[in-house]
Image: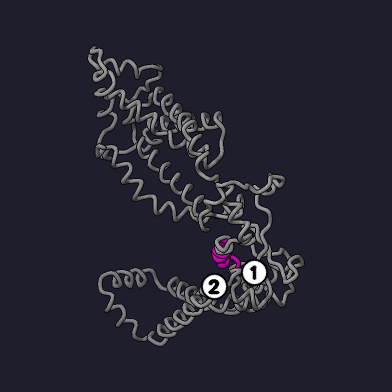
Amino acid sequence: MSSVHLLPIKTAALIFPLLAIVLFLPAAVVTYRRHGVMTSWRTLSFYSFLFYALTAFFMTLIPLPSRVVDVCAKYPKMAQPALTPGNTFGDIWKEAGGEVSFGALVLHNPAVWQATLNVALLVPLGMYLRYHFKRGFLTTAAIGLGVSLFFELTQYTGVWGLYACPYRLADVDDIITNTSGAMLGWWLAGPLTRWLPTLDSIDDGVLARRPVPLGRRLVAFIVDMCLLPFAMLFCTLVAALFVDVGFLSGLLLTVLVYFVLIPWTLGGTPGKRLLLLKLVGPDENARPAPWRLLVRAVVLALPMVPIAGVMMLGVTVLLSLPGELLFGAARTLLDEPLELIYALGGFEPLLIFGFLTALVCGALLLVFCVALYRNPDRFGFHELLSGVHNKALPHKRARRAPQEPAPEDEATAKIPAE
């Protein structure tokens, strides 16, 4: 494979990890809401599709011309798109030089290989649409047409105005071959879908063993942690209208409102409601008593609130510093970190306190996680002591087809671990 074709793959490999991290939380929320579980097989399928989509997009763009190059002067023939279908056959005959042989017309013909690559570009798309997204043939053809049209418009517009003129030819034959590739991929995925276990059967098998997966609870917790600073700001501003609120009192008020009052009235925190989870008491149905929610919040906050408090206090102190001093400290940290440590000698007690707090809370968090994982029901200390635990609400697929029985075929024997 030439360096021209390897460069888009290398570029996608560099960008993919960052994109995967950015998309993890929204992808996890959507997956848990639709399927109730995020199995390793479905996760692998999704992220492999993401890497493929990124690579296919870069295949149509890279290598990019240098910004100092006058693309209008260097690529004048690319300004007008090729709108006549069938030009590919003329290119094949032209590259063959009038010679009628298998080598000239096919094996050693660059136009044939270019058309083959155009077909192959969207073959994986058709396979993913059939297996992962469960789309039909006509829908796959329409999506393939739309994706191919997007590629050609991106080329024709010079990457949507990034360049003054196009540096690649927008060709209607590319739309035809790309769309054909998506349809071919859908057809080729037929035997594959019969051999591989369906994603739904894998999901149902995992949910049968554990109705509330630990990952679902973890994603709900991450969502709550992302929303908690905004909740603290809101609660502090509202409380400040009536009483004098300090940092610690504002933090405690937020914990009471977010983890006690809201779950008692709505059945769960915003993160849990988003992930279709409900907090229930020992009787499984009635909402838990406020005192149980308070016990749960206190135990859950033991390793988390001190760390969050130290971090938020540190951020507050940094934001209160003058910009020149802050940037100067950052430059010193990068250039001479030991000098910055000596300069902070006056803050030594505060630094030691923050370090010890983080160390103790980290140890508590580690013990908490180990106990959670070793419990057969995956209950943590906050659930065992309060009697409050999570109950899964029906996910989208379960609500859409409640009459479908759980699949009982040999594919369920291939269920990977959660």
- Between 230 and 294, the one lying in front of the other is 294
The image shows residue 208 at horizontal and vertical percentages of: 63, 57
Judged left or right of residue 375, residue 70 is: left
For the magenta stretch, what is the residue range?
Answer: 219-232
Judged left or right of residue 302, residue 120 is: left
Circle on res. 58: none
The image shows residue 75 at horizontal and vertical percentages of: 27, 28
Residue 307 is at least partly visible in this image: yes
Q: Which residue is mark 1?
A: 258
Q: Amino acid at mark 1?
A: Tyr
- Between 115 and 12, the one lying in front of the other is 115
Where does the N terminus fall, quadrant-wise? top left
Q: Is 288 colored magenta in this rendering?
A: no
Q: Disc 1 on helix, strand or loop?
A: helix
Q: Amino acid at mark 2?
A: Arg
The image shows residue 105 at horizontal and vertical percentages of: 27, 18
**Residue drawn where x is 59% and y is 73% of the image:** 380
The image shows residue 179 at horizontal and vertical percentages of: 46, 28
Mark 2, Cα crowd under 10 Å, few <14 / some 14-19 / many 20+, is few
**Residue drawn where x is 34% and y is 50% of the image:** 14
**Residue drawn where x is 61% and y is 69% of the image:** 377
Q: Which residue is mark 2?
A: 374
From this view, report whether residue 61 is shown above or below residue 232.
Answer: above
Residue 238 is at least partly visible in this image: no
**Residue drawn where x is 33% and y is 30% of the image:** 168
